[in-house]
Image (spheres, rainbow, N blue to C red):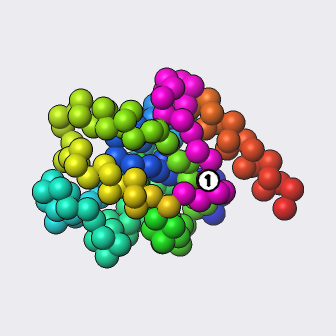
Amino acid sequence: MSATSLKTIVLMGVSGCGKSTIGKFIAGQTGMIFIEGDDHHPDVNIQKMSRGEPLTEADRGPWIESLAAAINAEISPVVVTCSALTTRIRRLLTLLVRSEVWFVHLHGDFELIRERIANRDTHFMPEALLKSQFETLEPSPGIPKIDVSQSPEEIFRHIKQQIKWIQLLEKKK
């Protein structure tokens, strides 16, 4: 498979929406390589978020560059977690990655996500930043939006349906 035919699925959304859980599930079901976006944050970003300070667009640049380099280093299709909250960051990631990038927005209401964050203890992102993430999130009409109140199996089924739809539209171009 040539590098230009590789596909990258980016699971995007606010912290606590289930990107890592669903990404690992997809990788387990498909054999795709899983890349955890949080692993590519510079230490300064993690420290900033741990203090309850939201990242700026400038803070996100080095993170996206590192994440894109990790994606480009793979020779197989990948599923990646990345909040990708803004159009600018999604555009930057798309420009830096050599394979075709498909975004899938994992979406849930504020209370559901807040509860998930409150119940996890191994992540650097505090519940206090959730409101700023919802405020920063810029939805894109062309990106499939999947409800995360469902089981991982159901979410995966919906993602597969959306990807088939995208592929069908591409064939008609």
Q: Secondary structure at mark 1?
A: loop
Task: Give coordinates of residue 145: x percent, y percent.
Answer: 58, 45
Q: How many numbered discs?
A: 1
> Is 157 positioned to the left or the right of 44 in the image?
right
Residue 22 included in the magenta stretch of the image: no
Front in this rendered view, residue 56 or 159: 56
Residue 73 x, y percent position in the rendering: 42, 60
* Picture residue at 45% right of the left edge, 58% below the top: 137
Residue lying at the far right in this picture: please name it: 172
Residue 31 in view (yes/no): no
User: Residue, x 72% and y 49% (percent of image)?
Assistant: 166
State yes or no: residue 152 in magenta.
yes
Taking depth in this image into account, of 41 and 30 the one nearest to the observer is 41
Query: Which quarter of the figure is the C terminus placed in?
Result: bottom right
Q: Which residue is mark 1?
A: 143
| Residue range (magenta) | 139-155
Q: Residue at x 66, y 57 (%)?
A: 142
The correct choice, above or below, for 4 with respect to 19 in the image is below
